[in-house]
Image (cartoon, rainbow, N blue to C red):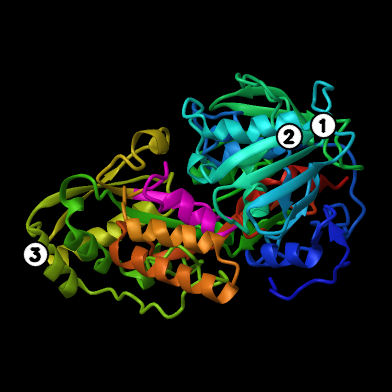
Amino acid sequence: MTDALLPFDPVLQDGDQPRRAVLRALLAGGLAASGVLPTASGAAQTAAPRKGGRLTVATQSSSTADTLDPAKASLSTDYMRTHLFYSGLTSLDTALAPQMALAEEFATADATLWKIKLRKGVVFHDGKPLSSADVVYSLNRHNDPAVGSKVRAQTQQFESVRATGQLALEIRLKGANADLPVLLATSHFVIIQAGTTTFNTAIGTGAYRCKEFTPGVRTIALRNPNYWKPGLPHLDEVTLFGIPDEPARLNALLSGDVDWINEVNPRSTKRVRGMPGYTLLESQAGLYTDLIIRQTVGVGRNPDFTLGMKYLIDREQIKRAAFRGYAVIGNDQPLDPSHRFYFAGLPQRPYDPERARFHLRKAGVLGLTLPVVASVAAVGSVDMAMLMQQSAMKAGLNLSVKRVSADGYWSNHWMKSPIGFGNINPRPSADMLFTQFFKSDAPWNESGWNNPQFDQLLVLARAETDPARRKQLYADMQVLVHEKCGVGIPVFITNLEAYNSKVKGVTSHPLGSFMGYTFAEHVWLSA
């Protein structure tokens, strides 16, 4: 994505601010934008889409905690449901640039006060017209502790969200954030009806209406005939459910029971390629499975233990053995090498059992047996744990691999086991990734890391409008994570999906599976 300015009309915005000022604020976040963000209605199709048909999708995750509440979404199935039934103020294209959605204008002069005008004629599934009151309610509820929003750490940036008209509102931030249009394009920030407190069904403005929702079982969505985007969606119906076991998921696809699956094991790629009528989709993104050392309990409190464990990570072997080469080497920094803010100057941490022994001895753990929890729910983690177990033996540490079921892993083990694994989907901006997973008070701060210097740099980077200075701040933050955080990132995983070739309009997306979880609006079935 380029930082070059796009052509724009230098007329006044909101009567007093030139669009060039708006551009400067937006481009500080690396966004392709003009003073008013472009609409998303001009996407060209390579073939004439066909109306009708039912698409069945199986993902790797499903839980009785599945939800229709966007604020509480935490699994890929939740993100897909969110995009089925709701719409956001903005959306993201395949370059991760924000496009207009429910908002038709999104303007600022200083990246602190944002003025938004809503699209006319949009109605919820029950016929109620969309208004600014719905947006104000949707955004403000994230800051209510009783809601349990997964993005409260981000919405604490909001000083106020208030309506200025029936279809107009303004958001005032506590500090400048040029990434706001990107932030509001993510699934947690879609718009619900004002006053909604129960989510047995979904009443949104999305491309589909909710016919059935049974947590941990399945979701059935029907085309919304009153969708605000003309001509969309193409499908009559979408059925969504989870199959945590990869071989079972793949068999369901190849037997024709489902049309599309994600998280294909690299070992299965030859089988997919060898089957006529099926397509393997590869996407490079910031997806990673990470080693988590909780720094708030037990040996994790000792920084030498964390360093010792990181030196036990044989990244080349993990790439080769766990992912069959479908990965890019990582360096315990959460931005992947393709990211515009990736710090390439950080020296690669080597695999070094002797250096690991030095730090583990200082931590007083040599000769101990420590449990490591892994599950197929965190893709590749079982193989990674076994490889680390072999490496630890060379350093004088016994790691006991405790393999647990995928069912309930995220609620019962993730961020609760002293040593375990996570699986982090890509985020559209560095600020979002750092805020959600590394800020000291973030609900998904996996290792319980608390670093005031990092938190301060995060706020400074968020408000920085000079791209070079912002890049340096993010570099400093990556160094802190690399050196002090209880998270080890061996590789960035190539996202592998497989689908029936009758599904058309499929493209890769840098935010991960199922076209960044927005597939249902865009794909269709051939005759």
- Judge whether residue 437 is colored magenta: yes
Q: Which residues are magenta?
A: 421-445
Q: Look at the numbered discs 1 and 2 and tell me whether their residues touch, using CB distance below 8 Å.
A: yes
Three-letter amino acid code at the position of disc 1: Gln
Quarter the C terminus occupies: top right
Label 1 to label 2: alpha-carbon separation: 7 Å
User: Which mark is first along the chain, 1 or 3?
Assistant: 1
Q: Position of residue 339 (x, y in %)?
A: 56, 69
Three-letter amino acid code at the position of disc 3: Arg
Q: Please tell me which residue is depicted at 61% across the width and 54% down the height of the picture.
A: 497
Residue 166: mark in rendering: 1
- Crowding near the residue tagged with mark 2, few <14, some 14–19, many ≥20 C-alpha atoms within 10 Å: some
Label 3 to label 2: alpha-carbon separation: 60 Å
Three-letter amino acid code at the position of disc 2: Ala
Q: Position of residue 113 (x, y in %)?
A: 67, 50
Residue at mark 2: 163
Q: Position of residue 54 (x, y in %)?
A: 78, 35
- The secondary element bearing badge 1 is classed as loop
Label 3 to label 1: alpha-carbon separation: 65 Å
Q: Please tell me which residue is depicted at 52% across the width and 46% down the height of the picture.
A: 154
Up-down relation of residue 128 to residue 71 (above or below): above
- The secondary element bearing badge 3 is classed as helix
Q: Please tell me which residue is depicted at 76% across the width and 36% down the height of the picture.
A: 164
Residue at mark 3: 361
- Crowding near the residue tagged with mark 3, few <14, some 14–19, many ≥20 C-alpha atoms within 10 Å: some
Q: Position of residue 5 (x, y in %)?
A: 76, 73
